[in-house]
Amino acid sequence: MKNQNLWNNNYIFKRLKSTYSKLMKFCDQYTYRHTGQGTY
């Protein structure tokens, strides 16, 4: 049961991470388009 919970947390974490990186890319493009500079 504990292992199952761990796996679920890991899965959720991975999903969050990929969503977060997509969001960051989108924000970068948006920022770049409107200010002429990205966050890097």
Image (cartoon, rainbow, N blue to C red):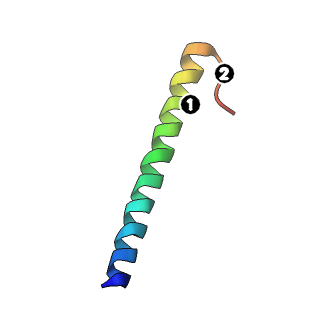
Furthest residue toward right: 40
Please provide percent x and percent y for residue 16.
Answer: 42, 53
Answer with mark 2 or mark 1, whichever residue precedes in sequence.
1
Furthest residue toward top: 35
Instruction: Identify which residue, 18 or 29, lies in the foreground.
Output: 18
For label 1, the crowd category at 10 Å Cα-Cα, with few meaning under 14, some 14 to 19 and many 20 or more, is some
Q: Which residue is mark 2?
A: 37
32 in relation to 7, above or below: above
Which three-letter amino acid code belongs to the residue tagged 1? Asp
Q: Which residue is mark 1?
A: 28
Secondary element at tag 1: helix
Drawn side of residue 37 relative to residue 31, left or right = right
For label 2, the crowd category at 10 Å Cα-Cα, with few meaning under 14, some 14 to 19 and many 20 or more, is few
Instruction: Identify which residue, 19 or 5, lies in the foreground.
Output: 5
Please provide percent x and percent y for residue 39.
Answer: 65, 30
36 in relation to 29, above or below: above
Q: Are marks 2 and 1 in contact (CB under 8 Å)?
A: no
Measured Cα–Cα span from mark 2 to mark 1? 8 Å
Drawn side of residue 31 relative to residue 9, left or right = right
Which three-letter amino acid code belongs to the residue tagged 2? Gln
Q: Residue at x 51, y 46 (%)?
A: 21
Quarter of the image holding residue 1?
bottom left
Please provide percent x and percent y for residue 37.
Answer: 66, 21
Secondary element at tag 2: loop
10 in relation to 39, above or below: below
Instruction: Identify which residue, 38 or 12, lies in the foreground.
Output: 12
Q: Residue at x 56, y 30 (%)?
A: 28
